[in-house]
Image (tube, helix red, strand yellow):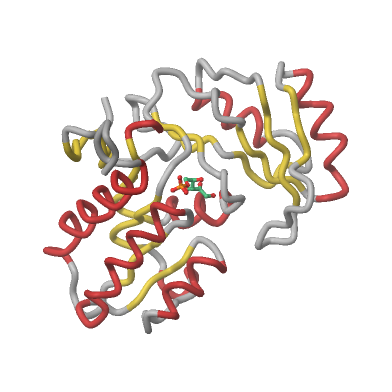
Amino acid sequence: MTQNGPSQDQLKDAVAAAAIDEIKPWLERDTVLGIGTGSTANLFIDRLAKLRDDFKGAVASSEASAKRLRGYGIEIFELNSVGTVPFYIDGADEVNAHLHMIKGGGAALTREKIVAACSETFICIADASKRVDRLGEFPLPVEVIPMARSYVARELVKLGADPVYREGVVTDNGNQIIDCFDFMIDDPVAMEARLNAIVGVVTNGLFAARGADVLLLGAGSGVERLTSV
Ligand code: 5RP
């Protein structure tokens, strides 16, 4: 707690706790959960560890999350062997009123989007700083096949973005990340599809076609539970 209220980490932990409350009544011995990536997801994993014996295991959206989950003795499953997950719990870099998001600050966007696509309920956990009216202040990540990086960057410039190669980062899929700066997004659903149509793009960090179903937003006044408008 700071003089001005809870810290960002405390808000992240509060939404992690709220997500546990949200899923706990639904856990069964054969439940396999989808788990995201990042500092908020990590706090969720730390709390989930206490419920280890109440569910079967997890599909992770990154090697880092898989390692953390395994560290707590939570079994990791391949998505292909599971099919769908009842819940996918993950953070976001930005989220709007429609529960469209920008994700991928941690470079895990592709696996995150795949697990989200296979989830029945996507629960986004975020502190209030992530809530925006219009997406794009946070640089939009785009995962690219390495040999296509320059070509994709030129196409992104044509769309009005200022693309910057995230140097030194290799995704879990062996690809590279371009971050789009100065790229405010008016129509996230259309832009998500437009970017994915560029040859060499694996996926982009707009989660709009499949946004979140529930947003647990942590603010000084408590955790707010929001559904898409
Ligand atoms: C990782 C992500 C994360 O969900 C996003 O970056 C938010 O991270 P944090 O919870 O650390 O603020 O998309 O690729």
Image coordinates for residue 93, horizontal then vertical, percent: 48, 38
| Quadrant that contains the N terminus | top left
Residue 158's image quarter?
top right
Task: Say left or right for 150 vs 208.
Answer: right
Q: Indicate the position of residue 96 as horizontal and vertical percent values.
A: 38, 26
The answer to whether 111 is drawn above or below residue 184 in the figure is below
Give the farthest residue toward the left.
25
Report whether residue 221 is seen: yes
Q: How many circles with numbers are drawn on the protein?
A: 0
The residue located at (37%, 84%) in the rendering is 73
Tell me: 83 left or right of 22.
right
Tell me, yes or no, if residue 208 can be seen here: no
Left/right of residue 111 with respect to residue 75 in the rendered view: right
Q: Is residue 181 above or below residue 89?
A: above
* 225 is higher (above) or lower (below) than 91: above
Residue 102 position in % (x across, y down): 50, 35
- Please tell me which residue lies in front, 126 or 87: 126
Q: Quadrant of the C terminus?
A: top left
Outermost residue, front side: 3
The quadrant in which residue 49 appears is: bottom left
Tell me what residue is drawn at x 80 percent, y 31 percent. Answer: 153
Q: Nearer the viewer, residue 212 or 176?
A: 176
Q: Nearest the camera: 49 or 150?
A: 49
Which residue is depicted at the point 32% across and 33% down?
128
Q: Residue at x 40, y 33 (%)?
A: 130
Residue 147: image location, x then y, percent: 88, 48
